[in-house]
Amino acid sequence: MLADPDELTSRLNSEKFDVLVIEADFVFEETIRDSTSLKLIGICRSSTNAVDIDTATEAGISVVNAPRRNAQAVAEHALGLMMALARNIPASHEYTKQGHWQDPTEPYLSMRGVELGGKTLGIIGLGAIGRHLAKIVTGIGMSVVAYDPYASDPPQVVQMSELGKLMSTSDFISVHVPLNSDTDSLVDAGMLSRMKQSSYLINCSDSAVIELEPLVGILRDKKIAGAAFDVFETHPIAPDNPLLKLDNVILTPHIGGATDETIERHSRMMTDDIIRFLDGQRPVNLVNPEAWEEHDS
C-alpha cells in the first residue's frame, strides 16, 4: 500500500528519520520541504520520477537509485512473451485444461507456431534491458537490429537501424525505452503500419510509447500476427481497455521485473549506498551530485 503523503511527512519528522527508502511511493515537494531531518532518499528502481529531485537538491538531500536492478528480469520476461506468442502457449494451456483436446492431431495443425531461431528481433531502446535481451536471443539463433539514437558502443551482435526500417523488417519487435518527450507515441500509427503481417509486438516499457487506438485496429484486423503487453495506461488495467477483447494478445500484470533476484539486487544496492553515505563516502548511484557537494563541503 502506498503511503499517504501527509502521514509520511508526519512520521519522518516525529521519528526524525535521516534516510527514506521507497520503491513505488512518491515523495512530493511538500514532503521534502517539510522534512526536518531527512538527509538521504533511496529509490529502489532506475526511474527517479517518483521523487522531486530538484526540491531534494535544493534542500541538500542526496538521492540514490538502483539502475539496471531489473534488466535481466525484464529481458527474460520479454523473451518469455515472445515464446508465448510464437508457440500459442497460453491458448494451448487453456485448450488442454478445458478438455478441448479430443483429436490427438488437431492442435498440431490449429496451434502450429513459428520458431524464434532464424528470425529478426527489433529492439527499440538499447539500454541495459535491450542489451540483455540482445545477448539472450542471439543464443537461440535470432538476428538483432536496434533503434536508439543515444546508444553508444552497441554490442557486436546488434545492427543499428532507423526506426522505420526496423518496424518493416523485424519479425518480433520489443520496446524498452523510458517514457519522455522523445518517446511519447514514438510507435505511432505510421510506424505500426510498417509492420509485417507475420510480425509480433512486445511492450515491457510504457504504454504511452505506443499509440493505443491504431494498435488495437491493426490487431483487430489481423494486420500483424499478435502482441504482448506488460504495461498499460492504468495499473491495474482498466476493465474497458480494448486490448482485453482481442484474441491475439497476451497480457501480464506489470510483472516484468518481479523476481527474487531483482529484490535482492536493489536491496544490496540501497544498503551499500546507505552505508557509504553514513560513512561520509560518496554513494555509487548518486542521482543529484550537487546535493552531495553541499553535504560534503
Image (spheres, rainbow, N blue to C red):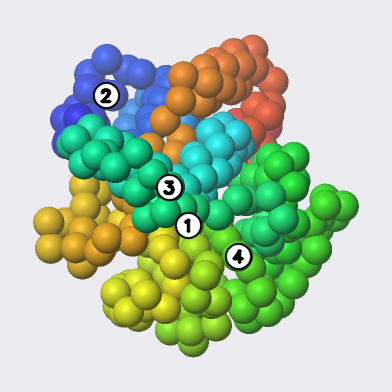
Query: Pointer 2: residues within 10 angstroms few (<14), some, or many (20+)?
Result: some
Q: Nearer the viewer, residue 261 or 10?
A: 261
| Amino acid marked by disc 3 | Tyr
**Which label sits on residue 171?**
4
Is label 3 or label 2 in front?
3
User: Spatial distance from mark 2 to mark 1, Cα to Cα?
Assistant: 44 Å
Residue 199: percent from left, percent from top: 53, 67
* CA separation in Å, label 3 and label 2: 64 Å
Does the residue at mark 1 contact the one at mark 4 (Cβ under 8 Å)? no
Write down the residue under mark 3: 108
For badge 1, the amino acid type reads: Ile
Front position in the image: 37 or 115: 115
Amino acid type shown at disc 4: Asp
Judged from the image, the secondary structure of the residue bearing numbered disc 3 is helix
Q: Is residue 111 found left or right of 186 in the rendered image?
A: left
Q: Nearer the viewer, residue 173 or 103?
A: 103
User: Which residue is found at the position 41% from the left and 26% from the top?
Assistant: 21
